[in-house]
Image (tube, grey):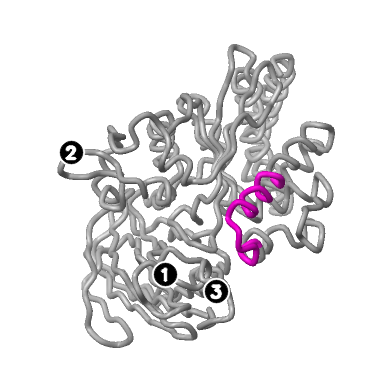
């Protein structure tokens, strides 16, 4: 990889030179058609410059990330949106990857419960931040006000924040206290990403599973069909087999060319289904530049809306959840004031029976198939009022990740629909900025629908 730095740098310089030449060539004396084509070339060169800059940075950093300067260890979180979390899904399984001089191996694999009960003193684990994480999510098992320790459910909720930089930091703190070793970074991938990797490796045959896993059915197996296997140990063994088979085949020669890899995985990174974090700031900047950091989007003074669902029942009912969000944006007045209406329609398509209790039961004595969630609505404008199913209601409010956020617990019976409507209003620092939205990578994603007065 280090041998690529020089040619990539030369390419970077050449692209910058072409871009400068195109800018110099622009003139009002050119015909409209020529100027239009010239501007198109300038746009292309600007995009290629970003790619070249990223290629140079990757070539500079990749050797160390691949263990050229010493052993690297990375934590991998396998998530499933069948049980939603802010980042996307619950981390049921995890792995530790070890890299030495470019040789990659899966050194550990396990369930989240192995970490919950692991380490020399599970009852005395502590986080030293981030402060915002502890303030907002500490109550979900990460911070006991009495003594500052975490609870055993911390690993079950590790992916609650919808920001992977924050999650990666917390993983790096808790993993060595939970029986693991110091890590250099972390990755998270969901069932759709696993399906994409299976498209490279070829079908995987599993004992006790009728059909081989392919790119077409892997995601559905992880999200739904695996729960038809009632013995937990058997399911864990199958998931271990899938992960190890994918890694072994990719490293054994199934790895595609970089261009094909980028075409296949690029959309998944943009959707927040494949994310990376590094404890090294320079390496973390690479993840940010290539859109793989899983960062919650910044408002930068503008407006935005993002809906986040966290499963609060301990079941897999989110495989049947539809979340439809609309945002009506009011007119901006002369003082910079604007209002709007955010409407979230949540439909629980889960049955009231006929599936394993692991899928439909819950930890709070609600009827089978109930979807209980911790709903959070992130907005640029502050919430003024809220109704649930047309009736006045309340939500806890605050700020998080640079946004206003309003949250509440909500129960949806099987086959039921709840409608949450927020009235928002305020003055934005930069109202001219493009509206920011974020689609949570759950099972059934529906983009925000925007309308303007």
Residue plotted at (46% across, 72% down): 361
Q: Relative to residue 421, is residue 217 drawn left or right?
A: right
Q: Is residue 418 above or below residue 380?
A: below
Per the image, the residue denoted by label 1 is 362
Q: Distance between the residues labelled 2 and 3?
A: 39 Å
Residue plotted at (43% across, 39% down): 165
Q: Image quarter for residue 104?
A: top right
Q: How far apart are marks 1 and 3 (CA)?
A: 15 Å
Asked whether 240 falls inside the magenta stretch, the response is: yes
Q: In the image, which residues are magenta?
A: 226-242
Q: Specify the farthest residue to the top.
A: 69
Q: Specify the farthest residue to the left.
A: 146
Q: Relative to residue 194, is residue 338 drawn left or right?
A: left
Per the image, the residue denoted by label 2 is 147
Per the image, the residue denoted by label 3 is 320
Q: Which of marks 2 and 3 is in front?
A: 2
> Going from the N terminus, do you reach mark 1 or mark 3 first?
3
């Amino acid at each position: 990889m280090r041998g690529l730095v020089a040619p990539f740098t030369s390419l970077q310089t050449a692209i910058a030179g072409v871009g400068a030449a195109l800018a110099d060539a622009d003139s009002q004396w050119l015909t409209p058609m020529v100027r239009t084509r010239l501007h198109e070339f300038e746009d292309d060169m600007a995009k290629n410059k970003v790619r070249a800059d990223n290629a140079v940075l990757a070539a500079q950093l990749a050797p160390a990330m691949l263990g050229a300067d010493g052993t690297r260890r990375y934590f991998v979180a396998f998530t499933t949106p069948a049980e939603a979390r802010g980042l996307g899904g619950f981390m049921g399984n995890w792995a530790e990857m070890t890299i030495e001089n470019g040789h990659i191996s899966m050194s550990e694999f396990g369930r989240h419960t192995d970490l919950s009960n692991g380490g020399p003193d599970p009852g005395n684990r502590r986080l030293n931040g981030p402060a915002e994480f502890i303030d907002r999510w500490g109550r979900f098992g990460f911070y006991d006000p009495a003594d500052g320790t975490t609870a055993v459910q911390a690993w079950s909720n590790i992916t609650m924040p919808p920001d992977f930089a924050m999650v990666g930091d917390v993983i790096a703190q808790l993993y060595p206290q939970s029986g693991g070793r110091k890590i250099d970074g972390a990755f998270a991938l969901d069932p759709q990403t696993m399906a994409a990797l299976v498209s490279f490796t070829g079908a995987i045959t599993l004992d006790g599973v009728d059909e081989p896993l392919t790119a077409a059915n892997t995601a559905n197996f992880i999200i739904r069909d695996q729960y038809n296997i009632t013995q937990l140990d058997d399911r864990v063994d199958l998931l271990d087999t899938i992960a190890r088979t994918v890694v072994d085949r990719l490293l054994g020669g199934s790895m595609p060319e970089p261009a094909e890899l980028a075409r296949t995985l690029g959309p998944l990174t943009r959707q927040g289904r494949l994310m990376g974090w590094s404890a090294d700031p320079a390496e973390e900047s690479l993840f940010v530049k290539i859109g793989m950091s899983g960062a919650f989007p910044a408002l930068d003074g503008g407006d935005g809306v993002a809906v986040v669902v966290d499963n609060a029942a301990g079941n897999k009912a989110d495989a049947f959840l539809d979340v439809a969000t609309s945002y009506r944006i009011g007119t901006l007045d002369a003082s910079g004031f604007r209002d709007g209406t955010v409407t979230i329609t949540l439909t629980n398509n889960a049955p009231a029976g006929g599936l394993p209790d692991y899928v439909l039961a819950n930890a709070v004595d609600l009827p089978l198939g109930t979807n209980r969630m911790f709903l959070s609505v992130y907005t640029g404008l502050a919430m003024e009022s809220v109704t649930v199913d047309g009736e006045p209601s309340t939500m806890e409010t605050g700020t998080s990740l640079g946004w206003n956020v309003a949250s509440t617990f909500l129960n949806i019976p099987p086959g039921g629909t709840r409608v949450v409507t927020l009235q928002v209003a305020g003055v934005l620092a930069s109202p001219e900025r493009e509206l920011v939205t974020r689609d949570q990578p759950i099972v059934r994603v529906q983009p925000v629908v925007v309308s303007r007065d």
